[in-house]
Image (spheres, grey):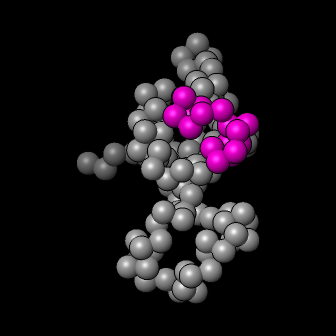
């Protein structure tokens, strides 16, 4: 069964540790996006960011971004049973209990079909 795991990491400084933890449980690839949420926009942390930011302004404001990570994992009976549960446990080991403030939001969605996960090697 394929599942998409999406995680919004509140503390960007924990991103490297989280990636290490995900790799340890068997995650093969992760896409990472800089993101922000309603709370940061409403609190004014986003007000000084230009409408079309330059690379320099993005780097200057990097601390105000969350990180949104997503991956697609496949659980194979007898081979990778419980991968999603291990991934969630590894996440909470890095971030702390996700029911606490300022940790993050993790969702797991079923995937009906995925294209491009299995890449062929060109010769």
Residue 54: image location, x then y, percent: 43, 83
Q: Is residue 79 above or below residue 60?
A: above
- Residue 64 placement: quadrant: bottom right
Residue lying at 34% horizontally and 45% vertically, measured from the top left? 121
Q: Is residue 92 magenta?
A: yes
Task: Check the picture and name the quadrant holding the N terminus.
Answer: top right
Q: Is residue 8 visible?
A: yes
Residue 49: image location, x then y, percent: 55, 80
Residue lying at 70% horizontally and 45% vertically, measured from the top left? 101
Q: Is residue 111 visible?
A: no
In the displayed structure, does residue 123 sit left or right of residue 107?
A: left
Q: Nearer the viewer, residue 60 or 4?
A: 60
Q: Which residues are magenta?
A: 90-108
Residue 52: image location, x then y, percent: 53, 86
Q: Is residue 23 above or below residue 109?
A: above
Residue 58: image location, x then y, percent: 45, 74
In the displayed structure, does residue 113 sit left or right of residue 61?
A: right
């Amino acid at each position: 069964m394929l599942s998409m795991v999406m995680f919004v990491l509140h503390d960007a400084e924990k991103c490297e540790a989280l990636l290490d933890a995900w790799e340890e449980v068997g995650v093969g690839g992760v896409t990472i996006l800089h993101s922000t949420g309603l709370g940061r926009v409403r609190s004014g942390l986003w007000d000084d960011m230009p409408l079309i930011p330059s690379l320099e302004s993005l780097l200057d404001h990097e601390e105000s971004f969350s990180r949104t990570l997503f991956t697609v994992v496949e659980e194979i009976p007898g081979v990778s049973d419980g991968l999603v549960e291990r991934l969630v446990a590894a996440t909470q080991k890095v971030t702390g209990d996700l029911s606490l403030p300022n940790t993050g939001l993790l969702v797991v969605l079923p995937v009906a079909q995925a294209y491009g996960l299995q890449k062929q090697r060109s010769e």
